[in-house]
Amino acid sequence: MSHTIEPFLDAGVCEEMIAEVNRFIETEYTRENAATRKAYIYEYAVDMEVFAFALHCPGSPETNSLPGFDLAELPAPLADLSQRVCSHMDIHSGRVLLNISRYPENCDRVSPHHDGELFDFDVVPGQSTVVHSGLRPKEVALLTLRNDTTGVGTTLYDDDDKPTETCALTGELLRFDNLNYRHAVPATGARTDASVDVEKEGPPRWIRYVVGWRALEQDCLFWENDGPARSIDLAGAAAAQRRFLADHWPQQKEEILPRGQFPVCSPYI
């Protein structure tokens, strides 16, 4: 099966969760955390904002020495939610990447790609990132906290580029196969409620707000040199992470850190 969608969080508390996540971004998306790879820099898109953080959730001895936030460092509602999602995905060891995507009106399309922990890659503007080495988890989960768009959401593509459109409503959790399918996000378009006067109501709102989780070590495949991906166990994935941090990250962070926009000063809420 390519994907599932199910109710997961009461729609009435999704705006409260957005406020918790926003506060976490404002506090922890820092140059210092990005330098240690507790936070990830994704300032490649012009319109949307993407933030990511490594979490020791659920954690394991093999990965305790790797960078990441302990659950006690997260707002309690976000920590509880992350634990629930990990349990739902049957992630029982290692770390996960918490990924937040905030989309304004008329945001450009996100090109088809696989999610994963990228060690060696090239960013081609307007195209999918070219991955030369990295870890690709078997599954990705995306929770929609706000969706004021009129069109479809995440679209999956198989090896023949056949699209499968999905549409997750507020509070619904989308889980999809990240090994056999790439995913893209269509342009957002305009608000569904055109009658809202944002100047009178205050700052403009993100039209779509999604929080995602994926394993960083458990149940991953290993990419290398554009060849076929191969299975790797938790200990092997953790060792690959440590090799990357020791051998490649010191130089890579000098290229990536200048892209970070610290602190976050967004005109949207």
Image (spheres, rainbow, N blue to C red):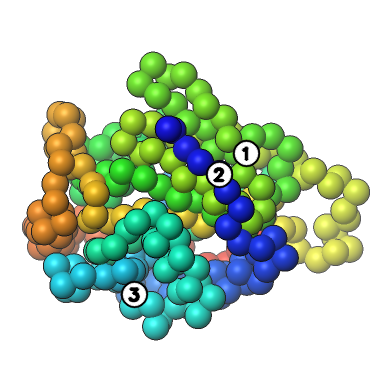
Q: Earlier along the polypeptide chain: callout 2 or callout 1?
A: 2
Viewer-proximal residue, 210 or 174?
A: 174
Gap between marks 3 and 2 measured at Cα: 28 Å
Gap between marks 2 and 1 measured at Cα: 8 Å
Residue 12 locus on image (x, y percent): 72, 65
How crowded pointer 1 is (Cα within 10 Å; few <14, some 14-19, many 20+) is rated as: some
Tag 2 secondary structure: strand
The label nearer to you, 3 versus 1, is 1
Tag 1 residue: 167
Tag 3 residue: 69
> Which residue is located at x 14 percent, y 46 percent?
232
Let me know if residue 76 appears in the view: yes
Tag 3 secondary structure: loop
The label nearer to you, 2 versus 1, is 2
> Which residue is located at x 33 percent, y 69 percent?
57
Give the residue type that dot 3 points to: Phe
Disc 2 to disc 1: CB gap under 8 Å: yes
**Left or right placement of residue 112 versus residue 166 in this view:** left
Q: Residue furthest top?
A: 160
Viewer-proximal residue, 101 or 26?
A: 101
Q: Quadrant of the N terminus?
A: top left
Give the residue type that dot 2 points to: Ile
